[in-house]
Amino acid sequence: MKILVPVKRVIDYNVKPRVKSDGSGVDLANVKMSMNPFDEISVEEAIRLKEAGKAEEIVAVSVGPQKAQETLRTALAMGADRAILVMTDEEVEPLGVAKILAKIVEEEAPKLVITGKQAIDDDSNQTGQMLAALLGWGQGTFANTVSVDGDSVEVKREIDGGLQTVKLNLPAVVTTDLRLNEPRYASLPNIMKAKKKPLDEKTPADYGVDISPRLTTTNVSEPPVRQAGEKVEDVDALVAKLKAVGAI
Amino acid sequence: MKTLVLVEHDNTDMKDATLAVVTAASQLGEVHALVVGSGCASVGEQASKVAGVSTVHVADDASLANQLAENVAPLVASLMESHDAFLAPATTTGKNIAPRVAALLDVMQISDILSVESEDTFTRPIYAGNAIATVQSSDAKKVITVRGTAFDKAAAEGGSASVEGVTGAGESGLSSFVSEEIAKSERPELTSAKIIVSGGRALGSSEKFEEVITPLADKLGAGIGASRAAVDAGYVPNDYQVGQTGKIVAPEVYIAIGISGAIQHLAGMKDSKTIVAINKDEDAPIFQIADIGLVADLFNAVPELTEKV
């Protein structure tokens, strides 16, 4: 079985984003960028399936700028076998990404696509579900546990009230949630080896799909700032304060 | 504009999350509600009473019992031939179904809206709520998920919508329901609780979490939340998580106990009316947004607070 793992290059999890003063977006100049944390979990899950003998090949894919190569190299260093970069400097919306991925799926014929439930930059939470719709495949979103068994996969999903398990016929799309696994760090020898693994460069035009944006961002602003209140000395003062604001 | 609102329910009761979506939809135009389930006639009845809803479509079929996206999305897509906008709550149900509908309609979804600026323009949070984007959609049909805390709830009573049956496409053959582990609790749900007591990594174990957090929550009649660190460490189940990728809450009072205040956690609770923080680290970022802060060892302060409130 082949597994396709789409990954996205995003602002690092630990960086506090700054809104540009002209309202045009978030300032990404000289900001540390990393693989989207949910996509790291996806890469890890694919590697574990390969280690368990359930998969033979892992192909990492990214749609993004030239520098997304680094993100793909990270996936290769973790254990993916090869990578495809669909290079564009334009921002591609989830629908556009899903259309490109659907074409790559046609070419690569993976049995499973594993991707993060959302990217921590646009927080859309759409690409996996859209890809499943375009392919006419089942979807196991917000995965907490993934068990592949023959022609099907059971996905335990993190839902609002608890956990739900669904069974999907393969091929299928799985999107990962935080508790699925703890991604490994790439070792130095594996980082060196990853430099020699194949990385194909493509452009959206190679796939002949319309990815022109449907949404226009007209402004990006800071959220209302919350001011710090006051610190109280002890529990009695806290109780008095809570009573004063009518909280209890 | 004719809108279609996905009703959040468990085949017996309509959930409050629906009401905020009705408010958002009413800012766009006429509101139709859609109940998808099995044996869900009572939910259709409840939805028909929501103020502002003019028609309720009920799709009642065994294949829809668990609202599998593969079975629900084609039904919604076909109903969208006669509607202009589909709005779902940004719950795990809505987030699972709406993008599948959007792709079937070749529409770019607008996720987690905070406001309706006009019939094609909305605001939504990006970067864990550290920025608010205003986006304009050029799609003829709109597919939207709605952040429940950003809109007032429509009145659950007072409406008298007509109820119509609709038929789904049946089983997709792509997926099937296996099982569900839903925690049964007398406690208010996090997204509708007036008070939330939330615990972090500093609790140290699930036993301590139970011993320290639960009595305070019981006394206040509060919902219980947690930081990602506490969930990852296994102190509490996943559905307790408040934050960017967990639940977004905005109660009257949010009491953060032993939570340092990572930006991903703040993203899920900073719209709470009054934020209380108890932490022994006086430099913890949570104090920068807390209305009332107490620098103290939580193992002493929280039991004392429980006793005195």
Image (cartoon, helix red, strand yellow):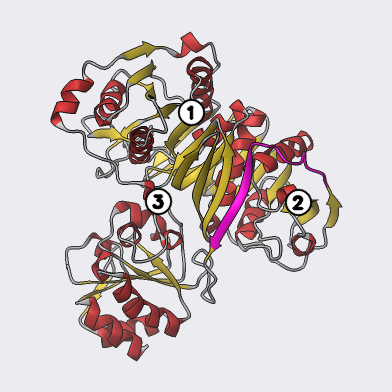
Assign the N terminus of chain B to one quadrant of the image: top right
Mark closer to the observer (2, 1): 2
Residue B146 visible, this angle: no
Q: Is residue B240 magenta?
A: no
Q: Amino acid at mark 3?
A: Gln
Query: Looking at the image, do the residues carrying marks 2 and 3 touch, with CB atoms under 8 Å apart?
Result: no
Q: Amino acid at mark 2?
A: Ala
The image position of residue A5, as x and y in percent, is 41, 29
Q: Which residue is mark 2?
A: B62
Q: Which residue is mark 1?
A: A93
The CA span between labels 2 and 1 is 35 Å
Q: Residue at x 25, y 43 (%)?
A: A15
Mark closer to the observer (2, 3): 2
**What subunit carries mark 1?**
A
Secondary structure, mark 1, is loop
In the image, the segment drawn in magenta is: B166-181
Residue A218's disc is none
| Vertical arrangement, residue B260 with respect to residue B170, above or below | below
Callout 2: few (<14), some (14-19), or many (20+) C-alpha neighbours within 10 Å?
few
Assign the C terminus of chain B to one quadrant of the image: bottom left
Callout 1: few (<14), some (14-19), or many (20+) C-alpha neighbours within 10 Å?
many
Residue placed most toward the observer, A167 or A132: A167
**What subunit carries mark 3?**
B
The CA span between labels 2 and 3 is 34 Å
The CA span between labels 3 and 1 is 20 Å
Q: Is residue B245 left or right of residue B203?
A: right
